[in-house]
Image (tube, coloured by chain):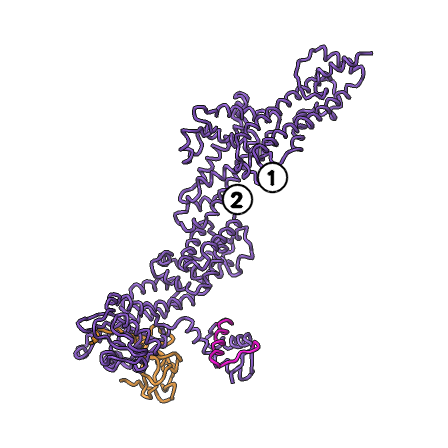
Amino acid sequence: MKVTIKSWTGVATWRWIANDENCGICRMSFESTCPECALPGDDCPLVWGVCSHCFHMHCIVKWLNLQPLNKQCPMCRQSWKFNVH
Amino acid sequence: MCDFDALWSDVLRIFPVLGGANAVSNDPVEENVFQNVRQHLMMLGSIDTFAALVDLEIQSTIRNVLVPKFWKHIHDCLVSSKLQGWINDQALAIEALPDKNGLFTQFIDAINELHDSFQSLMQVKPRLIQLVGAETKPAGKTVKLMQEDGIKNSLRDCLLAQLPPNFSVVVGAFYWVHFKLFTKASNLALTTVDSDVFDELLCVGCNFEAEQCCCQRLTDMVNKTNMKLFEMNLIDRLTGSALTALIKLKIKEHISDTCMGIFDRSHLKQLETWLSDVIMSWLTNIFTEWKSKDSINDIEVPESVKSFKVKLTYFMYETFAQSVIGQFFSIIIDYPDSIPAIDDLKICMEKIDMRVYLTESLRSSLEARILHPGVNTMDILTGYVAAIKAIRHLDSTGVILEMVTAPIKDYLRKRNDTVRRVVTGLTEEGPTDLSEELAKGETIKECKDSGTDEFSNWENWQPDPFGIDASIMQYNSSRKMRSADIISMVVDIYGSKELFMTEYRNLMADRLLAQLDFNSEKEIRNLELLKIRFGESLLHSCEVMLKDVTDSKRINAHIHSDGDRTENQLFDISSLIVSAQFWPSFNKESLQLPEEIENEFKKYTKAYEAYKGNRTLNWRTVTGRVNIEIEIGDRTMEMVVSPILAVIIYHFQNKNEWAIEDLSSITKVPASALRRRLSFWQNHGLISETTPGIFTLLEKESEKSQYEDMSLAEADEEDLESAMASASDQREEELQVFWSYIVGMLTNLDSMPIDRIHQMLKLFASHSGGVEFTQDELKHFLQRKVREHKLIFSGGVYQLAK
């Protein structure tokens, strides 16, 4: 007997490749959205700092805008730099 | 001095009554006899005494002779017609009479005899006046005779005093025949099928053969009798109640003949015409027909007929309303074809207060017809929606609606598939018209507006309609709720939109996963409609879910267009990529794919990762659809099956015989579930269980091949199993949050009853995410923990298991 699979329609869940589950700022899951967004994923992406911490982009931008002088990572207090892949 | 014997014989000639003889002769008496008697009596000075004597004698004749004789007649009638006992309902008694025509003639005879006696008594009065002299006024107060209508009154008094209970039946029978004659005469007799058939044989009126019809004769007899009754002033008192009962019976018959089960046209006009044309002209006929035409110069309706009319119109409305209310369930089901009937009822309700009767009867008929286990939830919902529409039409304030539908709501709340049915009704074409209602897109009022409505808009405030039992109205049923639209009324069954929306989400997830065709246009349309009604926030998850579907379509297209990947792939993979946070949680089934298949998925994941940076996929292998082609012997089968089925048959490629345990460990599917799936392939004649627990591939075409045709249908059935965790599972998961609290509490306080645990948790719950739950739910949760041996329940308190 020979079984040939012609096509397969599957179901998968997507997730961010990150070393944590929740955004350190809004405490929402990464796969969910920041408080301002409605749609997850492309519309509410994650960003990584060189310190390897990651946040919802909207959350960290908002945080950084609130810091008048030295922009620091809210987790480790190192100065914040975006880690561009 | 004078000859007393001669005087007495003269007196007897004038007043035969005094002789005690029943014979009432009316021989004319000469003037000189009067003169003679008068002279003598004047001389004796006892003319007053004499008048009193005559009066007394007449009274006693009426009481002892006339009236008993008359009643004896009536009694004989009843005995001969074998009517026994006292029948309470006059109408029923009339209907049940076996021999109406017999009673009819006997009644006429009795009245005739009574009238003859009455006539001769009446002659006494002018004679007495002649004797006594009109100018002298004797002590008239004591002599009833001299008063106007004196004899009539005493006759009536005596008759009524000895009235036998069944008398009205005889009168009823008399008028029953008369009515028949009358309706026939005025060509208004209802031509039912029966009468059509017998028309040629028997006269409808008198039941004689048509050639010998005696209707005219009978009618004359009736008219004479009526006249006699009227002359004796008896017609109202003696026949009134029987007549009313008879007419009521006729009205009831007429309504049930003409209006029963017909809701699509209005009846009130026609009924009113019938009442005035048939009944009222009949009554007028009874009261006036016997008069010569010139005595009623302008066709003047007697006072008694007028009062009859008021009474009967009221009764007709009442009967009609009762008949409509009695059939209101069918009216509801027929809505909107039954609108004319509802309009009729509306008019009746304005005249007669039937509100309480309506609610009571409708509640009980609804309970009897739809609120029992034998009825589909869908049918109950259909009935509920129809009832809302129909009752709305009847009563725009919504008070009746509220009272009538309360039991339906209560009942629907107890059915666990209600929400599911409502959602199905909303999204699919069905008998409930809910989808149409949704498409109408009426928006519910903003809560803020209606909350302040009663206070800010007080000038337009209207009190609730009367006739409401305050205890039935629930305290929370504000004006706003009563004026809500149908969708809100249906969603309102559960009292919360949230629960409803959760169920909607679950059902939508099931549908999307079952179809997997990345076609969500219809869902999007429904969602937009629902959003208008329930607001965006509750439906946010659903929106994300639908966006996942369209995104997946794009991602699949992108990955498929990638040239490198398509070169050495085994098969095409499409995937529905979902945002887990927004979907209902999946159930926990798992499936290990064979290595070469898994590699294909890894390739897809890689492509995805390349496309969407920093993101990866977790495959949910259990769910999906696989298009496979099986070549066995000289047969090829192509079918669409679930992944588990595909994996099972895939494993049989390399090894013809599997022990169920081995297959279970290699696929990571529990043996029991695996056995269920294997039966699918057994049905197809590909695999058989040769020895218990061992499954073998059947290479040769076996006798089981006739099952082939069923392949697709059965595969579809398998797909119907929900991939989602059920709502109650999700609920338990929510409660799981509290388990640590409960453990903490019981560690500190050793043992607690359930209500204290519930109270304590409610304190915590207000801080942690605000999960609301009832004591019942908690009890279920704790009982499960007891079953799992984590708690001990004894003496009404829970303890931690040591």
Mark 2 lies on residue: B352
Q: Where are the magenta residues, as a range?
A: B773-796
User: Residue B234 appears at what percent x and percent y?
Assistant: 61, 29
- Residue denoted by label 1: B86
Is B456 drawn above or below residue B207 in the view shown?
A: below
Q: Position of residue B267 (x, y in %)?
A: 44, 40
Whether residue B368 is situated above or below residue B598 in the rendered picture: above
In this rendering, the answer to whether B602 lies above or below B427 is: below
Q: In which quarter of the image is residue B713?
A: bottom left
Q: Is residue B794 magenta?
A: yes
Q: Who's orange, chain-wise?
A: A
How many marks can you see? 2
The image position of residue A56, as x and y in percent, is: 34, 80
Front residue of A71/B241: it is B241
Mark 1: few/some/many CA within 10 Å (<14, 14-19, 20+): few
Q: Answer yes or no: do the residues labelled 2 and 1 have beta carbons within 8 Å?
A: no
- Give me the chain letter of mark 1: B
